[in-house]
Amino acid sequence: MNRRILFPLPILGMCLGVSSCAAKPAPSLRIVNPGPMFVLVEQSSWLRCYTENLEGKIQFEVENPEYVEVTPRGCCVGLKRGSTKVTAFVGEVSDSIEVHVLDPKVEPQSFGFYPKNGIYEGHVGDRLEFKPYVYDVPYFYLREYIVPILLTDPSIAHFEGNILVAEKPGEVWYCSQLLNWVSQPLCFTILNDQS
């Protein structure tokens, strides 16, 4: 009987040995900064990387080095206005992030949230679509980051994303925000119901 009880033990030991020798997780490298990343000319921002099961120093490669310089420790320095891609890698394992360099001396002054039909008046009950615009060509890619900021009583009208919901007659003053820039205030008039 003892032989029968002991017989499975070597098999159990072999199974435990096999399971402990299971394959290690694959090596990985991930840039944890939310993308895209924004850097000002002559300013810097750090790239933050997370690695797992990798040995060796992280290296960086810039697709268009005229826009961004990356130090060996991962500090991105803005050189001139434009966009590029930065790749962090250790051996064959890599991750990339899009980097936009902004020049604070060249502010995109002509931007904002404008009525889709170009008419600055509506009626009570209307749901009016507004669209973001950037007229400065190098900044076209920033349109998706423009948000409206309501400056007047939200009971007259309010924004739901890019839709202006007209509640009652009055003037709606709002401006647009793009990163750290704010546009000039604009006025939209809400008229009585058309009926």
Image (cartoon, helix red, strand yellow):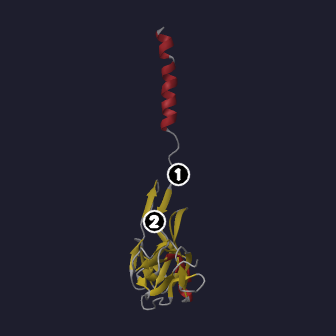
Mark 2 residue crowding within 10 angstroms, few (<14) / some (14–19) / many (20+): some
Who's the residue at 48% across and 8% down the image?
Answer: 1
Residue situated in front as seen by the camera: 21 or 110: 110
Furthest residue to the right? 117
Q: Which residue is mark 1?
A: 26
Who's the residue at 45% across and 61% down the image?
Answer: 56
Who's the residue at 53% across and 64% down the image?
Answer: 94
Query: Can you give x and y, in whole percent of width and height, for residue 91 in the image?
Result: 52, 62
Q: Which residue is mark 2?
A: 58
Whole-number angstrom distance, CA of label 2 to CA of label 1: 17 Å
Figure check: 92 above or below 118: above
Query: Can you give x and y, in whole percent of width and height, for residue 54 in the image?
Result: 47, 56
Mark 1 residue crowding within 10 angstroms, few (<14) / some (14–19) / many (20+): few
Q: Earlier in the sequence, mark 2 or mark 1?
A: 1
Figure check: 120 above or below 97: below
Q: Determine whether the residue tagged by mark 1 lies in a helix, strand or loop.
A: loop
Amino acid type, mark 2: Ile
